[in-house]
Image: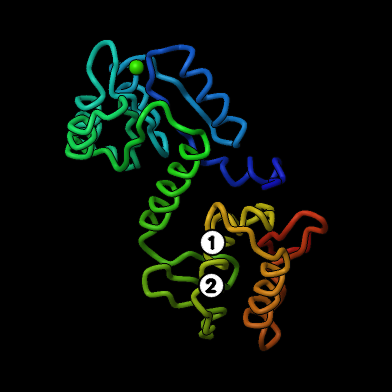
Amino acid sequence: MAYNSEALVEVHMAEKILLVEDEARVASVISRTLRMEGYQVEVAPDGETALSKTLSAPPDLIILDLMLPDVDGLEVCRQLRAAGFKEPVLMLTARDAIPDRVAGLDAGADDYLVKPFDFDELLARLRALLRRAARSEVKGPLRFADLELDPVTRRCTRAGRPIHLTTREFDILELFMRHPNQVLTRDLIYDRIWSYDFAGESNIIDVYVRYLRAKTEEGGGSRLIHTVRGVGYVLREEPW
Ligand code: CA
């Protein structure tokens, strides 16, 4: 898919990944790929550095190689969880090391990937983990201007007036409300709402935005979802 790289960087701005890998060459290839996808990446070459970096500035996700020179990945994972780190941990394991994978999940990893892996697979796993984490992180309702949307009860109101949304409309509006004032490309919206390999008709998003505008602007509410011509849409109080 052809992403608008600028918009993608904006959306990933808060997503910081800590890569724990001792092999410098592997670490550099992975971190370069992640940076190209718009993630912020820090590399820790050993378990001790990983722990201290995580405790001083917690990342949004950790990619943790099992084979490390000092404390092994399992122990690092256990210590991170014991220290209260709650964000996703994706563990990298050696090929066919099934006992390692089981142990990794037992130690508190959320998912594992077997080396050597395909980068598309790595990126898909990361997106899935980050998406899952984002869903569970917000306890209360999301608010933007006089719009309120509660991911738990799935209720939406504008200035206190209930707005009835379909599942898909709700998910798209939730995505906008999690990234206010950021331009979201159509491709990115597909990616987050359908799936990373969804090859849909490009006007589906436009149709949903039209529905969302009709529902949120009913009764004279000002426009909140604005078109950014040739790029996508943005949730803003003022036109782009
Ligand atoms: Ca290693």
User: What type is the residue that disc 2 sits on?
Assistant: Arg
Q: Residue 168 carries which label?
A: 2
- Does residue 20 appear left or right of residue 170 in this picture? left
- Image label count: 2
Quarter of the image where one finds residue 106: top left
Color encoding of the figure: rainbow
CA gap between label 2 and label 1 equals: 8 Å
Residue nearest the observer in this picture, 59 or 141 = 59
The answer to whether the residue labelled 2 contacts the one labelled 1, judged by CB atoms less than 8 Å apart, is yes
Q: In which quarter of the image is residue 233?
A: bottom right
Nearest the viewer among 105 and 47 is 105
Q: Mark 1 points at which residue?
A: 193
Residue 219, position in %: x, y? 67, 88
Looking at the image, which residue is at 28% across and 18% down?
A: 67
- Name the residue located 27 percent from the left edge and 38 percent from the top edge: 109
At 53% from the left edge and 72% from the top edge, which residue is drawn? 168
Tell me: residue 49, above or below residue 230. above
Q: Which amino acid does label 1 sit on?
A: Ile
Q: Whereabouts is ligand 1, in terms of quadrant? A: top left
**Secondary structure of the residue carrying numbered label 1:** helix
Front in this rendered view, residue 158 or 114: 114
Give the x, y percent position of residue 97.
Answer: 24, 28
Q: Where is residue 1 in the image (x, y as percent from the top left)?
A: 67, 47
Q: Residue furthest bottom?
A: 219
The quadrant in which the C terminus is found is: bottom right
Label ID, residue 87: none
